[in-house]
């Protein structure tokens, strides 16, 4: 059975909820929703797009991603390669910051909340535009813009 979407657009609700909570009280919100979004996005992406099942974000998954990225040499795969590079960066970042993401307030490392998430959402939107999944592309665009409005890209 083929999924209706490559990545479920409702997953972006995690980002919407995070932004809503952040606007309400930035000192009480934690960034665990951002981690949940990133992990679940890539679990679905690997399974539904790359036909590769990963069970956790770590060294093995990063190595698989690098191999897949290096095999994709077609110019049409630029956005896919960029997205795989974002995944590889997530594999590097998470072990260093995992405990900090569940702390309330502005404790989430800027590298993750500000820079990484903006770049990830931009890479997702760019890739989604190349697919036939119009609902996913529209949701990715809207979420990228909403996130950048709260956390402007440097």
Image (cartoon, helix red, strand yellow):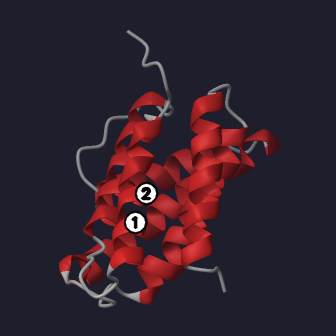
Location of the C terminus by quadrant is bottom right
Query: In the image, is residue 110 above or below residue 8?
Result: below
Mark closer to the observer (2, 1): 1
Q: Mark 1 points at which residue?
A: 20
Residues at discs 2 and 1 in contact (Cβ within 8 Å): yes
Report the residue at 43% width, 34% height from top: 8
Secondary structure under badge 1? helix
The quadrant where residue 45 appears? top left
Seen in the image, is 21 located left or right of residue 132? left
Seen in the image, is 138 located left or right of residue 103? right
Report the residue at 66% width, 45% height from top: 127
Query: In the image, is residue 29 above or below residue 139?
Result: below
Q: Residue 76, how many percent across, how many down?
A: 78, 40
Nearer to the camera, 119 or 147: 147
The quadrant where residue 133 appears? top right
Nearer to the camera, 64 or 2: 2
Q: Residue 114, how many percent across, how many down?
A: 50, 81
Report the residue at 39% width, 49% height from top: 13
The quadrant where residue 29 appears? bottom left
Q: Residue 41, how many percent across, how many down?
A: 41, 47
State whether residue 124 appears in this view: no
């Amino acid at each position: 059975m083929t999924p209706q979407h490559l990545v479920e657009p409702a997953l972006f609700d995690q980002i919407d909820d995070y932004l809503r909570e952040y606007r309400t009280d930035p000192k009480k919100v934690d960034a665990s929703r951002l981690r949940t979004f990133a992990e679940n996005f890539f679990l679905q992406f690997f399974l539904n797009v790359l036909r590769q099942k990963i069970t956790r974000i770590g060294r093995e998954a990063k190595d698989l991603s690098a191999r897949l990225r290096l095999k994709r040499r077609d110019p049409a795969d630029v956005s896919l390669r960029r997205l795989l590079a974002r995944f590889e960066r997530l594999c590097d970042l998470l072990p260093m910051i995992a405990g900090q993401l569940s702390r309330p307030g502005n404790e989430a490392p800027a590298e993750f909340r500000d820079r990484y998430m903006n770049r990830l959402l931009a890479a997702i939107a760019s890739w989604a535009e190349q697919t036939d999944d119009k609902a996913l592309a529209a949701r990715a665009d809207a979420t990228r813009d909403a996130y950048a409005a709260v956390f402007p890209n440097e």
